[in-house]
Image (tube, grey):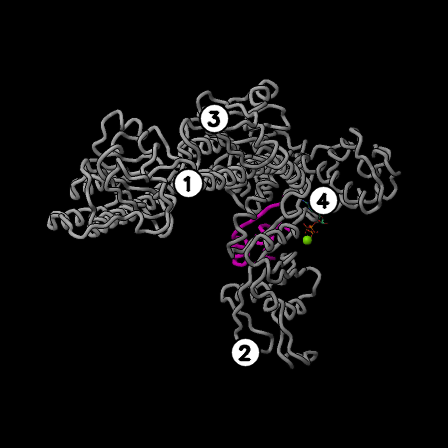
């Protein structure tokens, strides 16, 4: 064998070329079009080989490419090979280092070889002759396919005749070879990029689908397994999950998810790549055909296996497994699968967290709801305790009217909670951040009340040294409660009404009209309607202030609330006095319920406070502990009708039975109507409703009675 020294040893060059230049140019042009229209590499190589063989007048041709391991030359296309030679060419991979033949020489050196007489040329070896019969005669040209300095393959073309190759022909052959190299390289780049793009698109689609999975169902596993299968172009997939807490395993092959007995499945995967990846926590790739590592393939015939670890906190441990019949996995595929797996694991973890949190949130919610319910019962509405129908109705009215600026009149006996309701209205309204001013008309003497309300200018009267802002001005933007409004003098009522109508105040001694924006709440325990009829309260003012009347019923009329309030006060005073009193006995509760509570809630609160001061720690309140004044036998409230007054004197002889009984009946009816009207704060509709009659009937009855009296 001739040593490979320099290029000239390989190229025995003649002087005069014999080429058809026109044909050649056309061929080069055709090849150049392949560069811009990339298609499948194998197809391209076949086309170029056709051009080379046909244009240059060769009889046969072969292209071999270096394989992925860079150790072998593999046949890619042949031209004009007979079937037997084709079979040999494709079945033998030439080991570049070990085999000595023309192609390996070219691949090793990166230099072309031209052989004029294969029969006698010493560079033709036994290997060459074994590969194809063609090497026994004729001439051959073999050139490397190179990208930069890297040899990616060889092209060889053979001619039956012995030919002296001209420099021009050799150069042309090399031009074809380099063009082919570029085309192969570009197409390969395009193919890898296109493949990478395909994989990335599957990844993107999978990741976005995985990320929206909030619930812990099998969707993540389904997307993971099916996307991995497509990215890897694999034939089999398995996702194996060991549910550590429940000691079972979840397995899917891309379809349904199966729950398997852990022990039975552990046996199945005992010597598999799945076990290996779970143990090592790293990606394991395995080609079972050349692996002696005692890993047994899960699927018969699928020799290329890969497994990725899936570890989720200390709940799940598992693997994504893929297997292929054909060759392995590119680094790109492994990288992309790794990203997919990491996303799936994170999402699965999130879904676990999410489901745990929603379970927790659910139980917290019920807990909060329970607490809130308890608080609602205890504290009711704005700390106003009450669950009686009447009180709930009042809370609704407050809620509804709070945001409007309407005047509100709260009526009710002393201690029923009028001030509490007034404050609740203020707090519930959008004025809550502005002042709430409470003026008790009964507590301030007439003229003083006027200057308190309206303010005065300096020198307005003897004592007025400095200017004083009135409470009406002070309450600007907020709410003013006029408590015990029934105690306002008639003169002040006139002035107050004017202020209400005009919407401004004028300080005493002043001339300036100061606009005010105040929401008024009035309260009284007097019967204003009656006062109007008696002339002690101005009718016009009465109608002006009672736009929304709220009547708080006395405590005795809402027995449901008596015990609720009593228990609330026990808790309050337990805290205050540290008594740990347990509550009331049944008998004590009955006494509380039956007492008429003329002082209403205030009285109840005071009595419980007194009882609690004396009560021993940790005991239950019994009737003995309650004050004597509330232990009265309940008496029915009777209508106080003086029948005697209607009875004619006994000595008068005749008694007109019809008119006497009619009179008595009328008096009773009048009382009932009066009571109802009193309860409704003068509202006939409400009063009529309370008596289960129509408003029309109510008025008719009133008229009938007055006619009778007259
Ligand atoms: N429903 C209720 N829930 C809790 N506490 C209440 C309730 N009603 C009244 N009270 C308490 O009873 C006491 C008297 O309430 P408030 O001063 O509001 O009554 P009032 O109707 O304005 O009385 P008065 O007519 O004497 O001015 C206060 O201590 C108040 O906290
Ligand atoms: Mg009050």
Which is nearer the N-term, disc 1 or disc 4?
1
Quadrant position of residue 226: top left
As measured in the structure, the alpha-carbon distance from the residue carrying label 3 to the one carrying label 4 is: 92 Å
The one nearer the camera, 330 or 65, is 65
Residue underneath mark 1: 70
Which is nearer the N-term, disc 1 or disc 2?
1
Report the mark closest to the observer, 3 or 4.
Answer: 3
The one nearer the camera, 557 or 605, is 605
Residue underneath mark 2: 511
Q: Where is residue 298 in the image (x, y as percent from the top left)?
A: 50, 23
Within 10 Å of disc 2 (Cα), the crowding (few <14, some 14-19, many 20+) is few
Q: Is mark 4 within 8 Å of ligand 1?
A: yes
As measured in the structure, the alpha-carbon distance from the residue carrying label 1 to the one carrying label 3 is: 19 Å
Q: Quadrant of the N terminus?
A: top left
Query: Which contiguous range is marked in magenta?
Result: 525-552
Report the mark closest to the observer, 1 or 4.
Answer: 1
Residue at 72% from the left image edge and 40% from the top image edge: 565
Residue 536 lies within the magenta run: yes
Residue underneath mark 3: 289
């Amino acid at each position: 064998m001739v040593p490979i020294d320099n290029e000239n040893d390989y190229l025995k060059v003649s002087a005069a070329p014999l080429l058809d230049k026109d044909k050649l140019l056309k061929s080069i042009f055709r090849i150049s079009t392949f560069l811009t229209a990339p298609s499948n590499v194998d197809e391209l190589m076949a086309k170029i080989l056709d051009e080379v063989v046909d244009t240059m007048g060769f009889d046969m041709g072969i292209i071999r490419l270096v394989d992925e391991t860079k150790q072998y030359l593999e046949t890619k296309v042949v031209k004009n090979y007979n079937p037997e030679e084709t079979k040999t060419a494709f079945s033998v991979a030439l080991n570049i280092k070990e085999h000595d033949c023309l192609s390996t020489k070219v691949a090793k050196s990166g230099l072309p070889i031209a052989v004029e007489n294969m029969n006698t040329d010493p560079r033709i070896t036994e290997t060459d002759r074994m590969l194809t019969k063609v090497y026994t005669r004729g001439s051959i040209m073999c050139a490397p396919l190179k990208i930069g300095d890297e040899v990616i393959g060889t092209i060889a073309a053979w001619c039956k005749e012995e030919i002296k190759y001209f420099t021009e022909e050799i150069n042309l052959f090399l031009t074809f070879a380099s063009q082919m190299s570029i085309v192969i390289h570009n197409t390969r780049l395009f193919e890898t990029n296109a493949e990478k793009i395909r994989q990335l698109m599957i990844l993107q689609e999978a990741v976005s689908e995985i990320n929206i999975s909030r619930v812990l169902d099998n969707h993540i596993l389904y997307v993971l397994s099916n996307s991995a299968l497509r990215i890897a172009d694999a034939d089999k997939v398995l996702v194996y999950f060991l549910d550590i807490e429940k000691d079972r395993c979840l397995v899917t092959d891309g379809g349904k998810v199966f729950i398997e007995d852990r022990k039975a499945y552990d046996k199945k995967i005992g010597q598999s790549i799945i076990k290996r990846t779970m143990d090592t926590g790293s990606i394991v790739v395995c080609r079972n055909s050349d692996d002696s590592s005692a890993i047994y393939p899960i699927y018969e015939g699928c020799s290329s296996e890969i497994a990725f670890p899936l570890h989720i906190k200390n709940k799940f441990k598992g693997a994504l497994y893929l297997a292929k019949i054909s060759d392995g996995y590119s680094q790109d595929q492994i990288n992309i699968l790794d990203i997919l797996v990491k996303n799936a694991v994170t999402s699965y973890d999130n879904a676990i967290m999410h489901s745990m949190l929603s379970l927790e949130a659910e139980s917290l919610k019920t807990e909060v709801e329970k607490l809130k319910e308890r608080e609602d019962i205890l504290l009711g509405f704005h700390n106003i305790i009450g669950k009686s129908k009447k009180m709930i109705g009042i809370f609704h009215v407050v809620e509804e009217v709070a945001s409007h600026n309407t005047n509100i009149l709260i009526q009710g006996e002393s201690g029923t909670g009028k001030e509490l309701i007034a404050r609740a209205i203020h707090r519930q309204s959008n004025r809550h951040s502005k002042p709430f001013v409470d003026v008790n008309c009964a507590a301030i003497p007439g003229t003083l009340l006027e200057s308190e309300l309206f303010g005065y200018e300096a020198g307005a009267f003897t004592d007025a040294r400095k200017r004083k802002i009135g409470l009406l001005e002070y309450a600007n933007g907020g709410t003013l409660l006029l408590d015990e409004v029934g105690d306002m003098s008639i003169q002040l009522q006139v002035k107050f009404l004017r202020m209400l109508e005009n919407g401004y105040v004028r300080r005493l001694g002043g001339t300036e009209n100061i606009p005010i924006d105040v929401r008024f709440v009035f309260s009284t325990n007097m019967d204003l309607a009656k006062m109007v009829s008696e002339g002690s309260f101005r009718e016009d003012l009465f109608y002006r202030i009672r736009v929304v009347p709220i009547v708080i019923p006395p405590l005795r009329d809402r027995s449901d609330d008596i015990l609720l309030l009593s228990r609330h006060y026990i808790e309050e005073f337990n805290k205050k006095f540290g008594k740990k009193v347990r509550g009331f006995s049944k008998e004590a509760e009955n006494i509380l319920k039956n007492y008429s509570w003329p002082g209403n809630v205030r009285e109840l609160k005071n009595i419980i406070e007194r009882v609690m001061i004396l009560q021993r720690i940790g005991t239950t309140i019994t009737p003995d502990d309650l004050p004597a004044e509330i232990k009265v036998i309940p008496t029915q409230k009777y209508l106080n009708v003086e029948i005697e007054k209607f009875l004619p004197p006994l000595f008068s002889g005749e008694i007109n039975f019809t008119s006497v009984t009619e009179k008595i009946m009328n008096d009773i009816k009048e009382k009932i109507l009066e009571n109802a009207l009193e309860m409704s704060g003068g509202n006939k509709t409400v009063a009529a409703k309370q008596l289960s009659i129509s408003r029309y009937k109510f008025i008719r009855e009133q008229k009938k009675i007055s006619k009778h009296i007259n």
